[in-house]
Amino acid sequence: MLAIRNIDLFYGAAQALRAVNLDAEIGKVTCVLGRNGVGKTSLLRAIIGEHPVARGDIRWEDHDITHLPSYERARHGIAYVPQGREIFPLLSVKENLETGFAGLARRDRNVPDEIFELFPVLADMLKRRGGDLSGGQQQQLAIGRALVTRPRLLVLDEPTEGIQPSIIKDIGRAISYLRDKGGMAILLVEQYFDFAHELADAIAVMDRGEIVAAGNKNDLDADDVRRRLTV
């Protein structure tokens, strides 16, 4: 599993994370909730290696990855779906998916059929440029690109942001399916409480760079979690 212990993270003199502890287990969805600006994306940047931590440890499947660069973490099975999707607008859908080949052995450089089963629209748009897709279709493409890497840890940063309700449901079904397969840990950052609460096995709530509430979904007071998101 992913085990984060007492990490601090700074941007210059500003401290973004304070002694954060978090676990994410294989076969479960762990949701990190919080308002804007509380440190959720900074936590993900620490996990994927985009920003160094000043203190603490990050371990994944018994490997200390605290100081590994992002590309090495990807080779350890960590995939990231960023907020805003960040697909390549001038590349086709097929070419966007194939950018996930970079960290794979040559024998594994193919797009699994499972991705098109989860998101059939991608199969119909393989030749279309990424920038011509709707926001929801781009989100499905970003998740598909991450799945091409065969991750063991899938990290998603607010996948419902700006997405129409029908595609939110499709993304929710895809996350549930991937969790139920039992071979992947899923770490989901969200502000949309209902979406997160329906999917989550465990929830952590952030405020001002700290985890202020955490536990199994059924052990937390849902109304209290909602209040922490709106205050």
Image: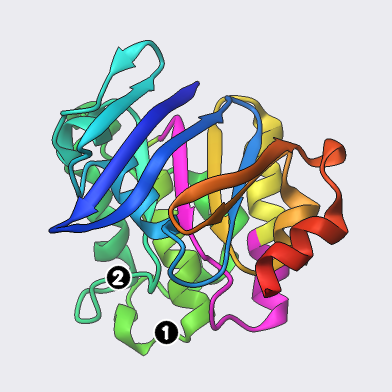
Where residue 133 is drawn, which disc sits there?
1
Q: Identify residue type, mark 1.
A: Leu
For mark 2, what is the residue? 87
- Percent x, y of residue 207: 54, 58
Looking at the picture, how far across and down is residue 19, in whole percent?
40, 36
- Residue type at the position of mark 2: Ile
| Residue that extends furthest to the top in the rendered view of this protein | 62
Q: Residues within 10 Å of mark 1 (few under 14, many from 20)?
A: some
- Residue at far front of view: 13
Q: Which residues are magenta?
A: 151-171
Q: Which mark is residue 7?
A: none
Residue 14 showing in the rendered view: yes
Quarter assignment of residue 37: bottom left
Question: Could you tell which of marks 1 and 2 lies nearer the N-terminus?
Answer: 2
Q: Residue at x 50, y 66 (%)?
A: 140
Estimate the x, y position of residue 189 in percent, counting from the top left. Answer: 53, 56
